[in-house]
Image (cartoon, rainbow, N blue to C red):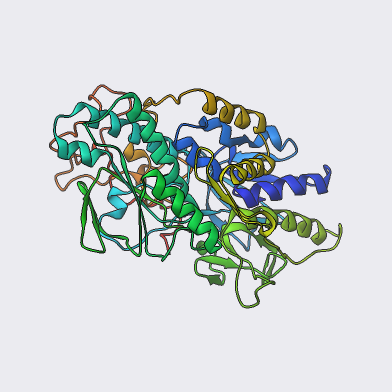
Amino acid sequence: MIVGAGFAGYRTAQTLSREAKGRAEIVLLNPTDYFLYLPLLPQVAAGILEPRRVTVSLSGTLPHVKLVLGEAGRIDLDAREVHYTDPEGEDGTLSYDRLVLTAGSVNKLLPIPGVAEHAHGFRGLPEALYLRDHVTRQVELAAATDDPERCASRCTFVVVGAGYTGTEVAAHGQLFTDAQVAKQPLRTGMRPRWILLDIAERVLPELDERLSRTADTVLRERGVDVRMGTSVKEATPDGVLLTDGEFVETRTLVWCVGVRPDPLAESLGLPMERGRLLVDPHLQVPGRPEVFACGDAAAVPDLEKPGSYTPMTAQHAWRQGKVCARNIAASFGDGERKAYRHKDLGFVVDLGGVKAAANPLGVNLSGIAASAVTRGYHLAAMPGNRVRVAADWLLDAVLPRQAVQLGLVRSWSVPLDTASPEVARVHGGPRSDDRPSPTEDGAPARNATPAEDTPPADDALTPPPDQPEPGPDVAPGPVRRTDRPSEGDA
């Protein structure tokens, strides 16, 4: 039984099915029927790749694995059972001989006033689709207004977190909005403004300083306002108050400060390390030899750096999944188990266009060479859709992007504080507890004045009657799932 189909879960299922050769039943429990290739998500938000390009069918690529759609709510370790809820609200129970917890991670929250209500994360496909629509809408509304202040507010986009995700979102976002403005000019002399914030001293602090400088130079030359040593002190519907005292008027706050382990791991009541399930070097839980864990949900000892744990990255999750599968096979007497060891082969960061920063095998690259290496790496790492992704890249190089609002995901569908960023909230879904509570008089809470960019009441995508209509792209507030415990960097 594998819980979660992220990098670790997918790789475990893929390798185990090859090792088992039909001798074992492999069950994969996941809320969606696809594996999401997260590193290319910023390109979905920027309109380079179509959403399905970064999703790989689980049933199509794992033919010998039984896929069960649902979210794990409770795991009974003594009874060896996983209780889950499927997409239509039906409860189910699955038994197991071996359990692999690869639940992954969710948006990392900080106790900053207003962030949970007014920011959006970037961990799932719904969030990327929402951001693409939202950015397009803000540019179009800005071009139509005669109010200079409102125009400037709508054309200001704030990204918090200068790690991999935040840096790529800001880099691609500036190119995306510049292309939109070229077709639909804003007020004379005005252009979209992207601000990248982080409390760290430099962009991409986890990388070599030379790569960090390369990324910083590209961002600044492109027009991104990079502010290191600065973060958000408070978020409001009209903008953000920065830690340096400046108030920035904006309608867009993208939260990329990192991730935290899925709270499902904490519900097991086993030893934890900063929200991650402690495992031994063989990826087994001490005292529970039938339970394995890897990826972001597991604290795996770093044998290359004694006393520390491997970071929460896709590269580690992918490699750990392979080791985990082979150790599961070894637990049934097929082969010998091995401890997880790794050796970094380098890092790649796509900065859009022909710009990138990479250091394959320790060789620092920038510009076109780095871009070629970066895209080549992604094509090699993806378990599917390689031709389609390459075709989209080719089309983007020779044709203008289509900047249109599809309206498939609304603000209230992708709250920042959620245990399931991979699933957008929908009206009539199985989780009635996800909905905001009514007002004191029993009537559903609603805003008195609708936002100017809120669709008409007869729009099929407006919030259902028992949910508040949000302000301008503002999440309705914290959302928690009762079937998972409350919360405790890829």
User: Is residue 330 in view from this perspective?
Assistant: yes
**Residue 6 horizontal/vertical position (percent):** 59, 48
Residue for point 42% across, 61% down: 487
- Count the labels in the image: 0
In the image, residue 448 above or below residue 114: above
Residue 409, visible in the rendered structure: no
The one of 425 and 322 positioned closer to us in this rendering? 322
Residue in front for this viewpoint, 368 or 413: 368
Of residues 238 and 348, which is closer to you in this image? 348
Question: Which residue is depicted at the point 19% across and 46% down?
Answer: 238
The residue positioned farthest toward the bottom in the image shown:
307
The answer to which image quadrant residue 75 occupies is bottom right
* 263 left or right of 115 in image: right
Quarter-of-image position of residue 446:
top left
Q: Residue 102 location, x and y as percent?
A: 60, 54
- Residue 432, position in %: x, y? 36, 42
Residue at 41% from the left image edge and 59% from the top image edge = 486
User: Image check: 207 left or right of 382?
Assistant: left
Q: Where is 13 relative to 145, above or below?
A: below
Considering only vertical position in the picture, is 161 above or below 463? below
Q: Is residue 21 left or right of residue 445?
A: right
- The percent coordinates of residue 109 (x first, y second) are 38, 59
Q: In the picture provided, is 217 more to the left or to the right than 178? A: right
Residue 180 falls in which quadrant of the image? top left
